[in-house]
Image (cartoon, grey):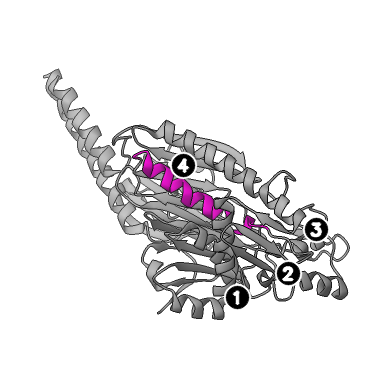
Amino acid sequence: MKERRVRRADLMLIAVLLAFGVVLALGNVLFSRAGQTAVVRVSGKVVAAYPLSEDREEEIAGAHGGFNRLVIRGGGAWMEDADCPDRLCVGMGVIRRAGQSIVCLPHQVTVEIVGPGRRDTDAVSE
Amino acid sequence: MKRFSFLIAAALVLSFLAGCSGASGRGASMTRELFAMDTYMTMTCRGENAEQALDAAEAEILRLDALLSTGSTDSEISRLNAEGGGACSEDTAALLRAALDAYRETDGAFDCTILPLMELWGFPSGTLHVPTEAELEHALTVTGSRHVSLSGSAVSMDPGTKIDLGGIAKGFTSGRLMEIFRSFGVESAIVSLGGNVQCLGSRSDGAGWRCGIRAPGDGASSDDIAGVVTVRDKAVITSGSYERRLTDEVTGRIYHHILDPSTGRPADTGLASVTIVSSDGTLADALSTACFVMGEEKAEAFWRERFDEFDMILIRTDGSIRVTEGVADAFVTSRPCAVIPK
């Protein structure tokens, strides 16, 4: 009985990881040709993409009815506020470079910076 | 055990989907860094003989540097300049020939004889001197590649004329490095000779090399890029007014080092940088300077005559970008960008 429960949890974990991987890959394909963009996902689904070049403030409807307030200003993005229990996402600070991300686990919200950046390049011509 | 294999399989699939591919392919990837030709260089290549290839590449860089440096009095170029000509080595002759060809083909926009002008402005020493009209006129009488003739390996120059092959030496060298890599069986390599980039083949994952183009502009740091061009077997060489600038401490005016050979002053054409993409490193190096001097209109007309030899990415001082048709699909940027048609 104990053994079975663990296996089911494993399978669920695998499923979640796979879904996350698929979304990440899709996000890469969909947004790799854009500029620096903050891609917002809720429960693994892309719900919005905002260019970092435009200042804005957005309320994200997270899972379980929670909310996260995302601010984009001066080329950076951060979580200004959230009603999640741990508020770790608010403490993650500002992200601005391709590949950086903010994660709010309780609300299953992720914000990832996608686009050309030095991280993505093999060399820089100057 | 079954559970573990599931997890491992999931992890593998996940890492594949997320694009975090591990190192694979024949031979290990090796990187070498060195300072030469007054700049910082990195070379990365992959193949069974990568180490020997890098040794040979480094030796070749140091050899060419010793031939071509205008900063060292022992170099062949310094000797030619001091003696007003003489016999030179095969490599120096090849490079000088390329420089003289570029002068003719670009209608003087690329000129390897502007050293007296550069010295007048103080670029080699780093101490700015804003020249007077009379000083400029005098320096202009000895500049111009028409004052240089090359026959076989014999160079002759008019009195006062000096040559500096620094404007194409790095492109020439990176091209030579690709030949060396090939001779060692290396199929995948990328070098950056102080920001002059040239690559061989494709990356180990089979994709093209992703080469960023530095963002010009006062607020931009050397970390910022204006876009990324994906290439195979190409040199990607940029001339920008952000390099080697001297500031007049009294007026606050900034002078950049890309001089227009016809006026002797920093070229002011509304362009902040010009990037040339070509399979010929020497050509790319010469044309990045020449097209900067020409300005947008002339550079585009020039490209239309020779679109099979190179492509270019122009960044204006207002930050907007113009990219030629041949490389447009391989170029990604978040800035306003227009395609230059044939």
Report helix, strand or loop for mark 4. loop
Q: Is residue A25 above or below residue B217?
A: above
Q: Are marks 1 and 3 on the same chain?
A: yes
- Residue A97 in view here: no
Q: Are marks 1 and 4 on the same chain?
A: no
- Identify the residue under disc 4: A89
Q: Is residue A47 above or below residue B307?
A: above
Report helix, strand or loop for mark 3. loop
Which amino acid type is shown beneath numbered disc 3? Gly
Label 1 to label 4: alpha-carbon separation = 51 Å
Tell me the chain of label 4.
A
Please give the range of residues in magenta: B164-185
Tell me the chain of label 3.
B
Q: Which mark is residue B294?
A: 1
Label 4 to label 3: alpha-carbon separation = 53 Å
Label 3 to label 2: alpha-carbon separation = 16 Å
For the residues labelled 4 and 3, say whether their Cβ atoms are less than 8 Å apart. Answer: no
Q: Is residue A40 left or right of residue B115?
A: left
- Identify the residue under disc 3: B122
- The mark that comes first in sequence, 1 or 2, is 2
Q: Is residue B179 magenta?
A: yes
Q: Quadrant of the C terminus of chain B?
A: bottom left
Q: Are marks 3 and 2 on the same chain?
A: yes
